[in-house]
Image (tube, rainbow, N blue to C red):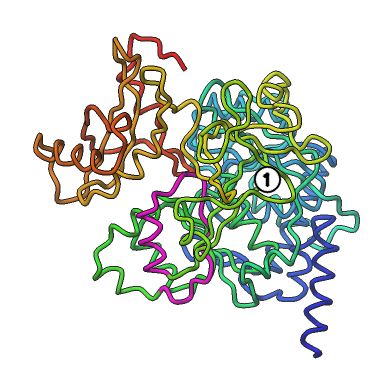
Amino acid sequence: MDAVLERQDLNQRLEEAALNGMTMAVWADVQPDKAAVVDPDGTRRSFAEVNANANRIVRLLRKAGLKAGDAVALAMSNRHEFLEIQSATLRAGFRITPINWHLTADEIAYILNDCEAQAVFVETRISAAVAATAQAPDLKIKIAVGGDLDGFVSYDAALAGIDSSDIDDPVLGNQMLYTSGTTGRPKGVFRPTPVITPQAMYALRGYDKDSVQLCAGPAYHAAPLAFDVRAAMGAGATLVFLDKWDSEHTLRTIAAQRVTHMHLVPIMFQRLLALSDEVKARHDISSVKYIVHGAAPCPPEVKHAMIAWFGPVLSEYYAGSEGGAGFMINSEEWLRKPGSVGKRPELLGSKILDDQGNECPPNVSGTIYHQLPPGGGFTYYKDEKKTQASRVGDYFTMGDMGYFDEDGYLFLTGRSAETIISGGVNIYPQEIDNELIKHEAVADSATVGVPHDEWGEQVKAVILLKPGYEPSDLLEQEILAFARDSLPSFKVPRSLDFVTSLPRSEAGKIQRGKVRAPYWEGRARQI
């Protein structure tokens, strides 16, 4: 009984601390010596150490002139300072913008200026981010992480002499992430009310005192930030960072660190599954209790194979930086509805609309619209036109296509910009890819529409083969025949190209626009 009361007391402390961004301070008090974060090189920082540096960062930025509501940006890889900076901004009322450090200097500079950053943390090895700061004249302080840079304050040196005790005036901070910018400049997704995850949610996901969270994707991206970084902070779990994806190293890390929780994307599933049976058997994955995935549609065959290997520990979500209803489906439910991303939520609704704005009946694909929460939910920062263009009444869209079945389960079919229109008929490429990937020779598929004088567009499959298979006319015909056996005739690719790689975003999504672009050179594609 004492243990139950103790846990209830801790949960109450954590719930109260979440309201002013001091969750890390509670964990530092409860488990000061436990590792809060493990870097890719094995460097460990305890909860007490992370909390102490968070307080130092607040005082450093306040001394530079920052106040609650001001913006802080960072451009760095997965390392412990990311966690410290995130914890600092949460308790000082700052608005944090993690930046994709793979962008060009001009692209990073655009985000620095657009988000109105007053301070920036830059990892020294990211030359584009260093160069970008020269184009951001409003920065009050520039902090170099991982070394020294001219014109920057050194992270370690600057924090060394600062008071590390908990600040006595915490204010809950916020974050503003930027869209991927598939058309035009990326836009900040501003949600005026910070998201607070209740402790009950962590309990539902199976977190306990021994939980270890693996962050295998880039921490700056919305999903790893929410499901890995922020989840570990809220649940008091050890966060293990990977620097870049390596399939066997990931399994090795799971076994060595006894990882219990992680967020992955479907391409990571495919790469893990591609390992030999011998390599898979070499690493103990029995510690894994919860794998959450999303960001890109997962071919049913891939998910079936992952559940067979890891067990029914997969939960799939469908949401975006903009928010929305938030669909979720666990393994047991998914096995009853393979391919679905979950049932229509009861709290905030979603609906499917056709091009005329009419609601689609079950099993008819259209554009997915999500209900906005009271108060409007989000805006695209400094872009009212784009904000309004995404909305129909009190619903908004992220441009995704899908349908509800007769039981209210949502199935994704792609994005509106990816829809192939052939002879006036809408064809959704993801449906085709989900079938093609079932062929034993196909490692990955990106179906696109290519120009056709009579039909406008024609369906083409762009195929990446598994090791051991070579492109040939015979294999092409075999794959197309396979498609004819499982797809309606109008969806069957009329041609097929083999490639040695397919472009993917940092979130793991196939960049279908880049696949399509060479076929449309010199021609205007109508969408």
Classify residue 178 as left or right of residue 387: left
Q: Nearer the viewer, residue 50 or 354?
A: 354
Residue 116 falls within the magenta-colored stretch:
no
Q: Amino acid at mark 1?
A: Ala
Determine whether 30 is above or below 329 in the image: below
Q: Kindly identify the residue that appears in the image at 79 percent across and 47 percent down.
A: 173
Closest to the observer: 13 or 315?
A: 315
Farthest right residue in view: 169
Vertical position of residue 205 compared to residue 132: above or below: below
Left or right: residue 401 versus residue 84 is left
User: Which corner quadrant of the image does residue 165 belong to?
Assistant: bottom right
Residue 214 visible in the displayed image: no
Q: Is 309 in the magenta?
A: yes
Image x and y of residue 329, in percent: 56, 57
Range of the magenta residues? Answer: 285-310
Q: Residue furthest bottom?
A: 1
Residue on which disc 1 sits: 325
Q: In x, y percent, where is residue 279?
A: 27, 68
Q: Is residue 36 above or below residue 117?
A: below
